Amino acid sequence: MPISAPSLGDAEDRHDPRFQSDELYDTETLDFPGLTPEQAETVLKRLGAGVVDKLELVEGIGWKAGIEATDDGVVIHFHAHDELLDDLLRRFEQQAERELQ
């Protein structure tokens, strides 16, 4: 098990305030015209996410992202620990640009 994961996935996690509180998490929504849900999921997986719901929701340590298909691309709904969000957005934008080339 990775040493960076504070959770063992057991019943005690449900009572630990670190896993219940939304105050340390921020939400950001970004539009990516031209990017398909498949491409978005691939980029998010490169950033360390695991698939929760195929082409809809991925989750990493300290963050998750919802993928919403639109007529011209996708909208990504990021929900991340406030210390991770800016870097996550920057890295996603860089990878998405590469994916579209």
Image (spheres, helix red, strand yellow):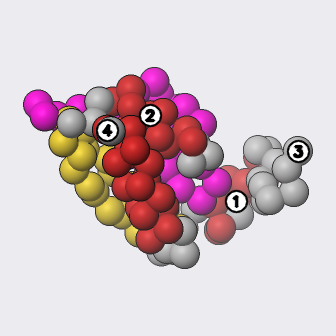
Residue 68: image quadrant is: top left
- The type of residue carrying mark 3 is Met
Earlier residue among tags 4 and 3: 3
> Is the residue marked by circle 2 packed among few (<14), some (14-19), or many (20+) residues within 10 Å?
many
Q: How far apart are marks 2 and 4 (CA)?
A: 13 Å
CB contact under 8 Å: marks 3 and 1: no
Q: Distance between the residues labelled 1 and 4?
A: 43 Å
CB contact under 8 Å: marks 2 and 1: no
Which element is circle 3 on?
loop
Q: Position of residue 59 (x, y in %)?
A: 55, 44
Residue range (magenta): 50-72
Q: Nearer the viewer, mark 2 or mark 1?
A: 2
Earlier residue among tags 2 and 4: 2
Q: Nearer the viewer, residue 25 or 70?
A: 70
Earlier residue among tags 1 and 4: 1
Earlier residue among tags 3 and 1: 3
Secondary structure of the magenta portion, mostly? strand
- Residue 41 shows which numbered tag? 2
Identify whether 78 is placed above or below 16.
above
> Is the residue marked by circle 4 packed among few (<14), some (14-19), or many (20+) residues within 10 Å?
few
The residue labelled by disc 1 is 15
- The type of residue carrying mark 4 is Leu
| Lateral position of residue 34 relative to residue 20, left or right | left
Q: Which of marks 1 and 4 is in front?
A: 4
CB contact under 8 Å: marks 3 and 2: no
Magenta-span inclusion, residue 68: yes
Q: Which of marks 3 and 1 is in front?
A: 3
Q: Where is residue 32 in the image (x, y as percent from the top left)?
A: 24, 46
Q: Nearer the viewer, residue 101 or 54?
A: 101
> Is the residue marked by circle 3 packed among few (<14), some (14-19), or many (20+) residues within 10 Å?
few
- Residue 100 shows which numbered tag? 4
